[in-house]
Amino acid sequence: MIILASASPRRKELLKKLCDNFIVESCDVEEIQTADNPKNLAVKNAELKAKFISARHENDIVIGADTIVTLNGKIFGKPADKFGAEKMLRELSGKKHEVITGIAICTENKIFTAAEVTEVFFGEMTDKEISEYVSTGEPLDKSGSYALQGGAAKFIEKINGDWSNVVGLPLYRLRQLAKSSGISL
């Protein structure tokens, strides 16, 4: 059995593009907040999630993922509230930033990990546009306070890299990691 260690409906929809026989199990682990670099932070949190679920399903394949946004070395997680979302979006406005997703696959007491990095270029956003977007509620549970597949699409000038990474699960990287680990998805 394949288990996605995530409550994210976006990750579930993306994983359906690789396989249709999996279940979703939410994991409420306390994520670490610091690491020597953003890639390692994303990978470590993906590992925590996958290992947490794998401990209850030792004979299954468990996939964990964690996505963060970085700008000039500063990490943007999920906002605490609407004011935090507005602040993040003002900082990202008119700038290029990186979206990093760490992925981890646990199976038979083995763990395989990787990270994907995508550059996202935001156009300038007015305070009014930011406020209107935040008032939709969409940014409140997203790293960096935006959803590429949602209302923020109108602010994104371009992306360099895997679009599915920005949504929360880099499909190509996950497929390659599974293949190189001898796992069939």
Image: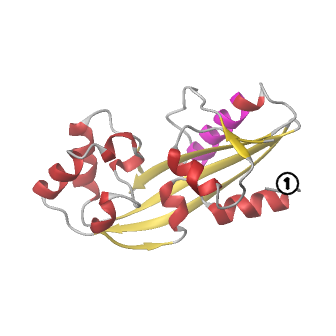
Residue 136: horizontal and vertical position, in percent? Answer: 24, 47
Does the magenta run of residues contain 41?
A: yes
Q: Main secondary structure of the magenta part?
A: helix
SS category of the residue bearing label 1: loop
Does the magenta run of residues contain 90?
A: no
Quarter occupied by the N terminus = top right
Residue nearest the viewer, comparing 55 with 69: 55
Residue 64: horizontal and vertical position, in percent? Answer: 66, 42
Residue nearest the viewer, comparing 100 with 7: 7
Question: Within 10 Å of the Cα at label 1, are there few (<14), some (14-19), or many (20+) other Cα atoms?
Answer: few
Residue 168: horizontal and vertical position, in percent? Answer: 53, 53
Residue 67 position (above or below residue 174): above
Looking at the rendered structure, the number of numbered marks drawn on it comes to 1
Q: In which image quadrant can residue 36 be found?
A: top right
Quarter occupied by the C terminus = bottom right
Residue 45 position (above or below residue 116): above
Residue at the (52%, 42%) spot, across then down: 8
Which residue is the site of mark 1?
A: 183
Q: Is residue 120 left or right of residue 13?
A: left
Coloured how? secondary structure
Residue nearest the viewer, comparing 16 with 30: 16
The amino acid at mark 1 is Ile
Residue nearest the viewer, comparing 120 with 33: 120
Q: Which residues are magenta?
A: 39-52
